[in-house]
Image: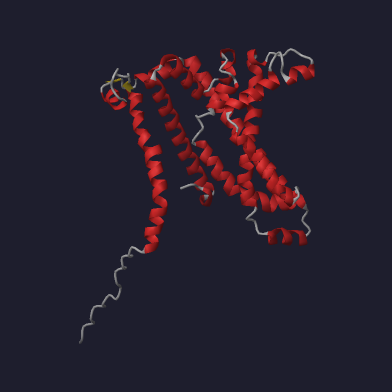
Amino acid sequence: MKKDKPAVSTSTKPRRKRWTSDDTELTLLGLPAAIWYAVFCYLPMFGLIIAFKNFKITPGRGFLYSLFHSDWAGFDNFKFFLASKATFMTMTRNTLLYYIVFTALGTFLNVVLAIAIDQFVFKKMAKTMQTIMIIPVFISYAAVQFIVYAFISTDTGIINHAMDANIRFYSTASYWPVILTIVKMWNSVGYGSVLYMSVLAGIDTELYEAAEIDGANKWQKIWNITIPALIPMITVMLLLSVGSIMKSDTGLFYQVTRNSGVLYPTTQVIDSYVLNAIFKNSNFGFTAATSFFQSVVGLLMMLFANGMVRKIAPDNALF
């Protein structure tokens, strides 16, 4: 009886892909961006070591010499940051509340404005509207503070003159959550809505035509076609913003408020607190510890939020 011969495997090892000219061109194309990120984003992260040192500038020496010859402080800089519980709780509360308000209201206004321009404004005016809306983004907060001052100044402010009142905005903290929210929306909503309009421009018009044939009105088309198309973009934008949950716009909270100490209960956030610490005490170790704390919390929050999105809608997750 003949024994069956063992089957000979006909599978071959996958060939290693050769390096082509296309690979070279793509590498050269991405090289400037990689160098830029390495030099300006990753290399400065080495400075986080200051958070664990009692950093002092050595007279006549450079930064690196002073850094390596400064004494180790361990977690003392973090203890100093957390020691003042009242101040820590106030600025952390303000930072989180402003983030929630700015993100929620900003996202809503961005989407509404983008849909309004895309659906209701004449198409010829759309480009003009986009140009006008992004202008505030390019205005420095150094100039914005004078615009705000022109409106709310006690003596010469437009609001006080129009109302024939004598409201002291710069000495009343309770007004500033509303003022800062208005200024932030004015500064950022236009740019955000342009991003969403780019998504709307890619929606197939045949979907709207088919919906119209089925008898759908304008609002039904927006609710069933436009908004679902925007959800992936909204999700990505929210995930990216979560990484900055403990960060704030320094120009908004420091310059627009004119760093008025009377307004600290409602305007002091972590970034403005750090900036004041640098100017007043030159405590670089403390400020580095605060920035390190912000970065770690932001990273953990973004990983958590991305994990939640991945479970609910995997296609909309960042990674």
Q: Nearer the viewer, residue 96 or 64?
A: 64
Which of the pair 107/42 is nearer the observer?
A: 42
The residue at 20%/86% (across/down) is: 2
* Residue found at x 54% / y 29%: 249
Which of the two residues, 62 or 101, is positioned nearer the viewer here? 62
Q: Position of residue 115 (x, y in %)?
A: 69, 46
Vertical relation: 313 (above or below) 13: above
Tell me: 319 left or right of 259.
left
Position of residue 141 in the picture relative to residue 126 (left or right): left
- Hey, which residue is sitting farthest bottom in the picture? 1
Whole-percent x, y for residue 40 in the image: 40, 37
Q: Quadrant of residue 98?
A: top right
Q: Is residue 262 above or below residue 233?
A: above
Q: How is the image coloured?
A: secondary structure
**Quadrant including the N terminus:** bottom left
Q: Position of residue 82 (x, y in %)?
A: 43, 19
Furthest residue to the front? 60
Residue at (31%, 65%) from the top-left corner?
A: 16
Q: Is residue 35 left or right of residue 276?
A: left
Determine whether 4 is above or below 234 in the image: below
| Front residue of this view, candidates 74 and 220 | 74
Which residue is at 38% across, 44% downward? Answer: 35
Count up the numbered dots. 0
The spot of residue 101 in percent (x, y) is: 61, 31
